[in-house]
Image (cartoon, rainbow, N blue to C red):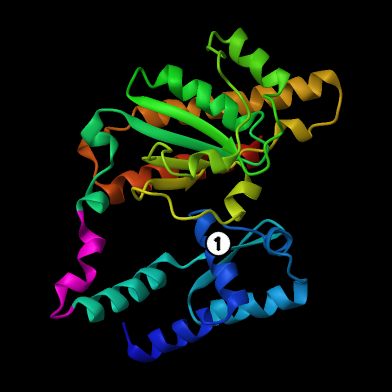
Amino acid sequence: MDTNLAITAFATLGHAGRLSVFRLLMRHMPQGVRPTEIAEALGLKQNTLSHHLSDLERAGLIRATREGRSLYYSVNLERAGMLVTFLVDDCCRGRPEVCAHLTGPEMQSLNGQEKGMFNVLFICTSNSARSIMAEALLNDMGQGRFRAFSAGTVPRGAPHPRAVALLEKAGFATDGLRSKDLTEFEGEGAPWMDFVFTVCDRAASEECPPWPGHPLSAHWGIPDPVKETGSEAEQALAFATAFDALRRRVAAFVALPMDALDRISLQKHIDDIGRDAVLEGKNA
């Protein structure tokens, strides 16, 4: 990477506001985010956000794409990767011990490959519907290879009755399902995760501390069925649509040949599952 490009990129990310926008967009990758959603998540004024987005785009760190009338911003992964390579190459040249932790065993394979079971955490805001359903689906469909958990950044306190009813009607176990706070999985003694999936945009926009064990993560955004305030039939349809989308996603996930894929390939697969989820939501 050209030194001048690196200097420009580092200078751009050296501003707290621009860095927060970049990190939010990275958490949503590979999907884009609309400016209104970025501003709401970060509490930024639209004109301030516009300046940040322009600076980041000028530095080549993000790109904008238009879909219909909406403009979506996403990270330029190629440029971001070049920046990381620039840092690591210079850091490690002649001093491999400095960066040895970047290629340690925890970065080469998933923890679950050693213990024979993969831990998966689904996160949404209230942990009452989408993440709860995903937890139950994976625990059943995973056939003993996966142990699923769910949590919320602002848990509602109990699973939504419609979510529980849907699971039971479809023959999935609901015993033990409860609404949990994300902090339950961040403290000492919490199970190490192999995968962490956010299933709502708000949760994806919130910053979480680094997870032990370097789990793979992806955003599988699904419209919140709880927000449907129409008729009983419309509410039931919203929950059924979310449930069916989650079931398809979980089925695609458990079908992945975990032992045959390296981390980069596996990351692409779980990103693709999330990208398909967004397309389904837009076409619904």
184, 266: nearer the viewer: 184
Q: Which residues are magenta?
A: 93-104
Q: Amino acid at mark 1?
A: Leu
Q: Which residue is mark 1?
A: 25
| 66 on left or right of 272 | right
Report the quarter where the N terminus lies: bottom left
Across and down, in percent, residue 120 comes to 42, 34
Residue at left 25%, top 79%?
Answer: 91
Query: Looking at the image, is 263 positioned above or below residue 246?
Result: below
Identify the secondary structure beneath mark 1.
helix
Which residue corresponds to the image point at 48% horizontal and 44% vertical from the top-left?
A: 187
Q: Residue furthest front?
A: 188
* Residue extending farthest bottom: 4
Residue at position x 62%, y 75% in the image: 17
Q: Is residue 132 above or below residue 265?
A: above
User: Quick check: is 103 in the magenta stretch?
Assistant: yes
The C terminus lies in which quarter of the figure?
top right
